[in-house]
Amino acid sequence: MHGAPRNHKSIVESRNWRNAVAAYLACTEFVDHCVGVMLDALDASDHAKNTLVVLWSDHGWHLGEKQHWAKRSLWGESTRVPLIVAGPGLAKGDCARPVGLIDVYPTLAEFCGLGAPVRASGR
């Protein structure tokens, strides 16, 4: 990682905690901006009425919580990820039920009338 600190002690000792968090937040802000540009372009196109938009992510990095700097943990917040599906024919609202990301592709294929994928996990 080009000499970047890899654990809590080294991040604290090098006084990089604030910089590490700022860099992470800058990355997420840039992704948010890019999604906005993409959605604006879709709205301005002829395809807005026949396009599904699916946004999801992993759970992101721990940024020093409990002295932890990584993606790997068994904490509750690490089991939840954003999943947004929007488009024509879909009801607006929230779903409180658990969703497995392994099911996203087969569900979208079925919704779009493509049939069940032959060699895909999930349902």
Image: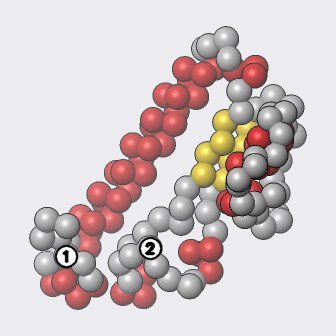
Q: Nearer the viewer, residue 18 or 7?
A: 7
> Which residue has dot 2 on it?
71
Q: Residues within 10 Å of mark 1 (few under 14, many from 20)?
A: some
Return the residue at label 1: 5
Coordinates of residue 119 in the picture (x, y in percent): 71, 53
| 36 left or right of 94 in image | left
Q: Residues within 10 Å of mark 2 (few under 14, many from 20)?
A: few
- Residue for point 60% across, 22% down: 42
Task: Relative to 67, say whether 23 is above or below.
Answer: above
Q: Residue at x 72, y 64 (%)?
A: 100
- Disc 2 element: loop
- The residue located at (45%, 35%) in the rendering is 34
Number of numbered labels in the structure image = 2
| Residue 58 point in image, percent of width and height | 54, 61
Res. 92 in view: no
Residue 94 or residue 116, whichever sits in front: 116
Q: Quadrant of residue 20?
A: bottom left
Residue 39: x %, y % from top left: 58, 28
Pointers 1 and 2 in contact (C-beta within 8 Å): no
Relative placement, left or right, of 94 versus 59 is right
Of residue 109 and residue 40, the one placed in the foreground of this image is 109
Quadrant in the picture for residue 115: top right
Q: Amino acid at mark 2?
A: Lys
* Mark 1 vs 2, N-terminal side: 1
The residue shown at (60%, 14%) is 44
Res 51 visible:
yes
Amino acid at pointer 1? Pro
Give the SS element for disc 1: loop
Whether 108 is drawn above or below 80: the answer is above
Task: Name which quarter of the figure residue 64 lies in.
Answer: bottom left
